[in-house]
Image (cartoon, grey):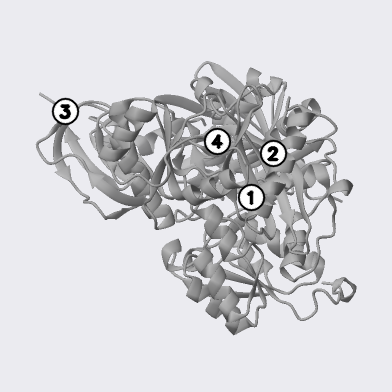
């Protein structure tokens, strides 16, 4: 950390990162650049994780389950008090959209890199968000006015409203607690499943119903607001490549989106943020249909997993801006000063097994050599030998590439993933490579159904005869180590000499 | 002296013969395929492999009784025993033959068990639900059978490979 990089702005501040994994590491790196000291928090499962040793200080907050560690606001605030942290960056997930925690920070006199509790509540309760947006003149998807009481009521509503419908956790996000239903008989069971997931993930089992838009694209707009009267959009991200409502590949700019629609979405996103007095970095998600009509889906009142693609095409460091804004400064960028340059794609590398229905695959990352090179960005929180704990999201890393245009960006991504060495646990990189080859993806003409339409992926394993021959040879050499080698029976000295290891 | 190894590759068992190993070069036969292989350890721990006209780069490690080969983003594991050891361990009978053991394929928590002792199941039937990383996953029977033992109950934590349910073949 250089003394020069500490400015009046950051003087006296210390940042606690209330998160783990790659996003904690991402925020710590930004703090380093700004000359801000950092505090990590960790559960017992993360005692040896990268974010812990990257930070200047680290505080244990509890046992492995997130409900007993990362989700305990009191523990996080106690860690802040203990270390004298003045600002909390929540990352994404965990407490990042928890209005109660935001208020507790306010009461404790600790700054928070995110919006006020009011904006979180307005946007966090999806049913309330829809009402607020409707009132602000932002187009929303038609659906139930509020949460649905039970499975029978859900079925009755769906019968009157018409299928297909989308069941959604009111407190949800990130695809959890969501179900697409196109059969009436499935509504009840799907409702209960969504409720169970919502309760487990968000501690709130309210579920509502929306009309399912046919073949929608999921395009979102990044916004930044600084509380000094500046609210801007930082352009769009295309996030339609989803598996079970989980984003897999994101890109910016959204391909084949007319400039008129792009500008209109940006303006609406700013209007949406202003409607809730938003402060910080946030994302307005839209569903876009074939006619480029777009509907407000939800607002994520936090930093988004896929923020790197926005940073790569605009040059804006969203985390740095979030920290500046949290410290009460105006943002350092302006709407007129931002443009999208080139194209960026992000691939999410998950510890899950594509050949076994994407079952989570925690364990030891025995081989991990991330790629590097021009136009390549890796956001990770692991090193070779790291344990991927079974308690949290199975994301290993985010690999992003940038190039002058989309075609070259895809080629660069493929070469980059091919050069990524990773093993020891099952992961989805061969699957990502397969997706990048899909005709619709290459053409840039796709919607959220792209993965479902692609058919069966067959995992590509190393099982050819030469690989097997080498595996056996390595086992053979391990078994015979110390004994004279077979055949020649020469000593290790003569062997070394012959191999040119011993010279002169 | 040649040494014969038995390797499991997916569902198949392959005989692999190390015909000679002079340290720099080895001659290895996999079925009808004979390779003259040279393996050089590079400073970063990877292995430069040359065999006849092919040139590849692997990384390798052992885990769960398997030798793993990693090449870029792809990997494969082989269970390898020398022939003598294989027979000393009881040969084919050592596997239990029937394939009637249902084991946990990942560490996690048992959400529910769908079968009881005496139940008949068909291949593909869901016998239990396992949760890890907030995701529920069905545990399915690989073959038809009758449940002879249930070793886990809802709420239990299991490790990879842990025996959950035992089946016997239907008469």
- The residue where tag 1 is placed is A304
Q: Image quadrant of residue A451?
A: top right
Q: Nearer the viewer, residue A481 or A379?
A: A379
Q: Is residue A366 visible?
A: no
Q: Which mark is residue A237?
A: 2
| CA distance for labels 1 and 4 | 42 Å
| Residue B54 drawn at (x, y percent) | 70, 23
- The residue where tag 4 is placed is A471
Give me the chain letter of mark 3: B
Q: Image quadrant of residue A18?
A: bottom right
Q: Which mark is residue A477?
A: none
What secondary structure is marked by label 4?
helix
Q: Image quadrant of residue A288?
A: top right
Q: Nearer the viewer, residue A146 or A38?
A: A146
Instruction: Indicate left or right for B128 with A360 as reference.
Output: left
**In percent of the image, x 75 and y 47: which residue is there?**
A233
Give me the chain letter of mark 4: A
- The residue where tag 3 is placed is B169
Nearer the N terminus, badge 2 or badge 1? 2
**In percent of the image, x 61 and y 65: which residue is there?**
A116
Q: Which mark is nearer the camera, 1 or 4? A: 1
| CA distance for labels 1 and 3 | 51 Å
Question: Marks 2 and 1: CB-CB under 8 Å?
Answer: yes
| CA distance for labels 2 and 3 | 54 Å
């Amino acid at each position: 950390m250089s003394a020069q990089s500490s400015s009046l702005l950051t003087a006296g501040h210390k940042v606690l990162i209330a998160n783990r994994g790659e996003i904690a590491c991402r925020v710590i790196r930004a703090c380093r650049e700004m000359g801000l000291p950092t505090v990590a928090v960790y559960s017992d499962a993360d005692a040896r994780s990268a974010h812990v040793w990257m930070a200047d200080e680290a505080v244990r907050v509890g046992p492995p389950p997130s409900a007993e560690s990362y989700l305990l606001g009191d523990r996080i605030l106690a860690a802040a008090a203990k270390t004298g942290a003045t600002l909390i960056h929540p990352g994404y997930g965990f407490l990042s959209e928890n209005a109660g925690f935001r208020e507790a920070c306010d009461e404790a006199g600790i700054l928070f890199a995110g919006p006020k509790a009011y904006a979180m509540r307005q946007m966090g309760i999806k049913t309330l968000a829809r009402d607020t947006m409707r009132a602000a003149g932002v187009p929303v998807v038609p659906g139930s006015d509020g949460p649905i009481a039970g499975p029978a009521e859900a079925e009755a509503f769906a019968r009157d409203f018409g299928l297909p419908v989308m069941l959604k956790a009111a407190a949800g996000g990130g695809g959890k607690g969501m179900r697409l239903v196109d059969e009436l008989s499935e509504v009840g069971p799907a409702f209960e499943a969504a409720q169970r997931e919502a309760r487990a993930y968000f501690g709130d089992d309210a579920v509502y119903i929306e009309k399912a838009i046919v073949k929608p694209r999921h395009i979102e707009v990044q916004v930044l607001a600084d509380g000094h009267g500046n609210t801007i959009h930082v352009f769009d991200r295309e996030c339609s490549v989803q598996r079970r409502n989980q984003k897999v590949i994101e890109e910016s700019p959204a391909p084949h989106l007319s400039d008129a629609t792009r500008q209109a979405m940006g303006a609406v996103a700013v209007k949406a943020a202003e409607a809730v007095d938003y402060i910080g970095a946030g994302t307005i998600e839209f569903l876009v249909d074939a006619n480029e009509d777009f509907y407000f889906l939800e607002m994520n009142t936090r930093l988004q997993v896929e923020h790197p693609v926005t940073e790569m095409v605009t040059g804006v460091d969203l985390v740095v801006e979030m920290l500046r804004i949290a410290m009460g400064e105006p943002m350092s960028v302006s709407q007129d000063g931002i443009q999208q340059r080139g194209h960026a794609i992000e691939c999410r590398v998950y510890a899950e097994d594509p050949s076994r229905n994407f079952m989570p695959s925690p364990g030891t990352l025995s081989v991990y050599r991330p790629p590097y090179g021009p136009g390549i960005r890796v956001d990770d929180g692991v090193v070779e030998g790291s344990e991927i704990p079974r308690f949290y999201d199975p994301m290993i890393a985010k690999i992003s590439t940038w190039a002058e245009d989309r075609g070259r960006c895809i080629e660069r991504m493929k070469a980059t993933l091919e050069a990524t060495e990773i093993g020891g646990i099952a992961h989805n990189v061969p699957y990502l490579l397969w997706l990048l080859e899909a005709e619709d993806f290459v053409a840039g003409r796709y919607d959220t159904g792209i993965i479902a339409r692609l058919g069966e992926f067959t995992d590509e394993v190393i099982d050819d005869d030469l690989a097997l021959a080498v595996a056996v040879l390595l086992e053979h050499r391990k078994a015979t180590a110390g004994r004279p080698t077979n055949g020649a029976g020469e000593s290790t000295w003569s062997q070394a000499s012959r191999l040119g290891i011993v010279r002169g | 002296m040649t040494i014969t190894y038995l390797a499991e590759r997916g569902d198949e068992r392959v005989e692999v013969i190390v015909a000679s190993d002079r340290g720099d070069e080895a001659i290895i036969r996999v079925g009808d395929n004979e390779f003259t292989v040279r393996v050089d350890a590079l400073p970063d721990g990877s292995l430069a492999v040359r065999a006849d006209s092919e040139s590849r780069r692997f990384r390798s490690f052992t885990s769960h009784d398997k030798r793993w080969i990693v090449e870029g983003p792809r990997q494969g594991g082989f269970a390898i025993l020398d022939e003598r050891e294989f027979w000393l361990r009881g040969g084919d009978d050592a596997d239990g033959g029937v394939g009637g053991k249902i084991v946990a394929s990942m560490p996690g928590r048992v959400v529910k068990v769908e079968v009881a002792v005496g139940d008949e199941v068909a291949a593909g039937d869901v016998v239990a639900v396992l949760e890890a990383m907030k995701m529920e996953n069905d545990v399915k029977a690989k073959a038809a059978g009758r449940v002879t033992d249930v070793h886990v109950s809802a709420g239990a934590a299991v490790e990879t490979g842990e025996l959950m349910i035992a089946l016997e073949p239907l008469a």
